[in-house]
Amino acid sequence: FFFPRPPTAVHHSIRSFHNKAQSSIPYSRRFNQANTSMSSPQAPISLFRSLLREAKKVDNYNFRHYAIRRTRAGFAANREMTGNEAVVALNEGQEQL
């Protein structure tokens, strides 16, 4: 089914309400990585994105692309990992950040 987009006035008021609600919560509580459980399904994706984000901050072109390549290859090699091995690997990845 196709649901039409709400009128812009309503859309902007919803967005401003959301921004006000989010701004009342401290940044450290909204994005606290310590609260995320390493066994959650979102944890590997979060770790992957964080590692790529940090790799992109490296100034040297060769080191930057090596870090990006290494991150992608490591996650591709361990894609099918489950159970206790996965938790241990995710904890090691968090330590590397």
Image: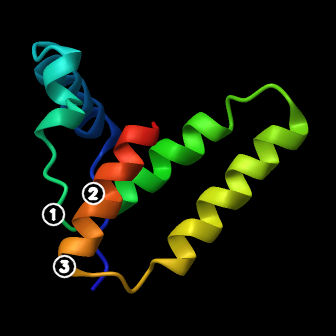
Number of marks in the rendered image: 3
- Disc 1 residue type (three-letter): Ser
Q: What is the CA distance from the residue labelled 1 to the residue labelled 2?
A: 7 Å
Q: Quarter-wise, where is residue 15 in the image?
A: top left
Picture residue at 64% right of the left edge, 70% below the top: 73
Q: Which residue is disc 2 drawn over?
A: 43
- Give residue 39's mark: 1
Which image quadrant: the N terminus?
A: bottom left
Q: In this view, does 40 lie to the left or right of 65?
A: left
Q: Which colour scheme is used?
A: rainbow
Instruction: Judge left or right: residue 37 versus residue 72.
Output: left
Mark 3, mark 1: which one is toward the viewer?
3
For residue 74, which quarter of the picture? bottom right
Q: Where is residue 97 in the image (x, y as percent from the top left)?
A: 45, 36
Q: Residues within 10 Å of mark 3 (few under 14, many from 20)?
A: few
Q: Mark 3 — residue?
A: 83
Q: What residue type is labelled 3?
A: Gly
Q: Do the residues labelled 1 and 2 touch (CB within 8 Å)?
A: yes
Q: Is mark 3 on a helix, strand or loop?
A: helix
State whether residue 65 is above or below residue 80.
above
Q: Can residue 76 be seen in this view?
A: yes
